[in-house]
Image (cartoon, rainbow, N blue to C red):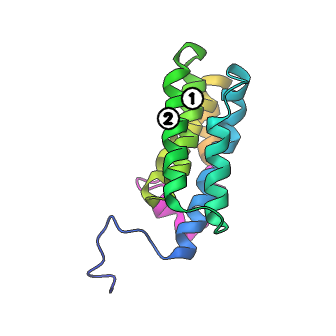
Amino acid sequence: MSEETKAKWANPEPAIHRAIALWAASCAERALPIFEAQRPGDDRPHAAIAAVRAWERGELPMTTCRTAAFAAHAAARDATDAGAAAVAAARAAGQACAVAHMFDHSPHAASYAAKAVGLHSGGEAAREAERAWQWEKLAPGLRAIGFPKGL
């Protein structure tokens, strides 16, 4: 299919899809300790990140990742008593895992991860520092996917 006829919502080429999935997983992984400190017995967000990494290696089907993403979002709903930072961290994991299904979940994984860090670590400066780290860790050719509105 030519680039002109390819739907805007269609996933990119497999190598790009895998690269953006790994980046989203890395973003979510940085926020994961925030969730785990508040909900140490709940491994659903951790399992979601592990699932998308396994998908990237060709070890899991996308459908398994979708199920794991839903579980991470359920963990976020269950963690409302643990605070907004923990909820955002779990949502970051769910969005990262959902990248296996649709690449355009990647900006949401990064945004939720930065939100979690900001809420946990002192506000806007921490959030902006996390966004800067995310920007630097994403290949320049993929930044339009991970940061569709720019940094």
> Which residue is situated farthest in the top direction here?
81
Residue 4 placed where, x, y %?
28, 82
Q: Quadrant of residue 93?
A: top right
Residue 141 - label: none
The three-letter amino acid code for the residue at tag 2 is His
Residue 138 makes an appearance in the image: no
Look at 54% across and 72% down and name the residue there. 16
- Quadrant location, the N terminus: bottom left
Q: Quadrant of residue 129?
A: top right
Vertical order, 81 against 100 (above or below) = above
Vertical order, 91 against 9 (above or below) = above
Secondary structure under tag 2 reads: helix
- Report the predominant secondary structure element of the magenta stretch: helix
Pick whichever, 77 or 13, lies toward us.
77
Pick whichever, 123 or 46, lies toward us.
46
Residue 90 placed where, x, y %?
58, 34
- Between circles 2 and 1, the one closer to the viewer is 2
Task: For marks 2 and 1, give the CA distance.
Answer: 24 Å
**Residue 64 left/right relative to 2:** right
Residue 26 placed where, x, y %?
67, 51
Question: Which residue carries the number 2 mark?
Answer: 73
Q: Is mark 2 in CB contact (under 8 Å) with mark 1?
A: no
The three-letter amino acid code for the residue at tag 1 is Glu
Secondary structure under tag 1 reads: helix
Range drawn in magenta? 134-151
Specify whether residue 66 is painted magenta.
Answer: no
Question: Which residue carries the number 1 mark?
Answer: 124
**Considering only order in the chain, which callout, 1 or 2, is on the residue closer to the N terminus?**
2
Specify whether residue 140 is painted magenta.
Answer: yes
**Residue 134 left/right relative to 149:** right
Q: Residues within 10 Å of mark 1 (few under 14, many from 20)?
A: some
Residue 30 placed where, x, y %?
70, 41
